[in-house]
């Protein structure tokens, strides 16, 4: 009986070790992949002339206009991103970018960070031209957390624990990289994670 227990335990440990070693680099056992953690921008390509740089463990920009675009593409996923912006910032997280060399709100879904947008209809918390926020939240002057889910044609956005977009449907874009935008003010990201679904 004891011998059977020892063999069973050995098989359990072996399968656990093999399961861990087959995970992609940067992926945790909960499936989250860290795209940015303050240590490098190796998972990103730069487009435009924004002065994205690493400073104090943050990816930040305060001049120019441009994006950090993920090197990998994603279809169905959840994103968790921690960011700080000033009151004048114009930024966003673009998902399913169909052209990673020229990112726009028409060839990607833009989850907006823009407290002072001239037309506030698609301000912070919205998906531009797709879903107005159910609640208007100001992001300026504080650390914020976006949680974005894209599964098939359905999108959900949560900002600081408050659902701003709930189950909106749009099927025009199905896959592509994600992009972090800089267009105005001061923008800082300290952590970006993605979990494929």
Image (cartoon, rainbow, N blue to C red):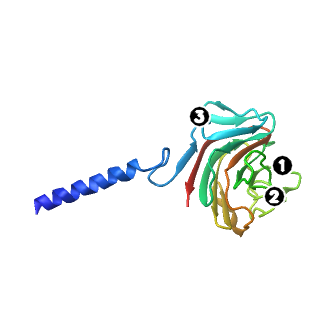
**Image coords of residue 17 (percent x, y):** 33, 50
- Closest to the camera, between mark 2 and mark 1, is 2
Which numbered dot is residue 80?
Answer: none
Q: Earlier in the sequence, mark 3 or mark 2?
A: 3
Left or right placement of residue 77 versus residue 182 in this view: left
Label 3 residue SS: loop
Horizontal and vertical percent position of residue 32? 52, 52
Q: Mark 2, residues whose alpha carbon is within 10 Å: few (<14), some, or many (≥20)?
A: many
Which residue sits furthest top? 55
Neighbour tally class for label 3: few under 14, some 14-19, many 20 plus, Cα within 10 Å: some
Q: Nearer the viewer, mark 1 or mark 3?
A: 3
Q: Which residue is mark 3?
A: 40
Mark 1, residue position: 116
> Element at badge 1?
loop
Could you tell which of marks 1 and 3 lies nearer the N-terminus?
3
Residue 100 or residue 58, whichever sits in front? 100
Disc ID at residue 122: 2
Question: CA gap, disc 1 to disc 3?
Answer: 30 Å
CB atoms at circles 3 and 2 under 8 Å apart? no
Q: Position of 115 compared to 158: left or right?
A: right
- Separation of residues labelled 3 and 2 (CA atoms): 31 Å
* Label 1 Cα neighbours within 10 Å, binned few <14 / some 14-19 / many ≥20: some
């Amino acid at each position: 009986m004891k011998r059977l227990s020892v063999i069973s335990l050995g098989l359990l440990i072996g399968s656990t070790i093999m399961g861990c070693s087959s995970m992609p680099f940067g992926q945790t056992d909960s499936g989250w992949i860290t795209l940015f953690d303050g240590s490098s921008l190796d998972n990103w390509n730069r487009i435009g002339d924004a002065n994205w740089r690493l400073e104090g463990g943050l990816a930040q920009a305060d001049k120019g206009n441009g994006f950090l675009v993920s090197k990998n593409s994603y279809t169905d996923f959840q994103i968790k991103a921690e960011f700080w912006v000033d009151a004048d910032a114009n930024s966003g997280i673009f998902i399913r970018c169909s052209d990673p060399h020229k990112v726009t709100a028409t060839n990607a879904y833009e989850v907006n960070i823009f407290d002072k947008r001239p037309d506030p209809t698609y301000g912070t918390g919205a998906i531009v031209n797709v879903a107005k926020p159910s609640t208007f939240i100001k992001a300026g002057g504080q650390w914020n957390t976006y949680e974005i889910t894209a599964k098939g044609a359905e999108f959900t956005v949560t900002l600081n624990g408050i659902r701003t977009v709930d189950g909106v449907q749009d099927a025009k874009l199905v896959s592509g990289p994600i992009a972090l935008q800089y267009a105005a003010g001061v923008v800082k990201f300290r952590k970006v994670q993605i979990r494929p679904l």
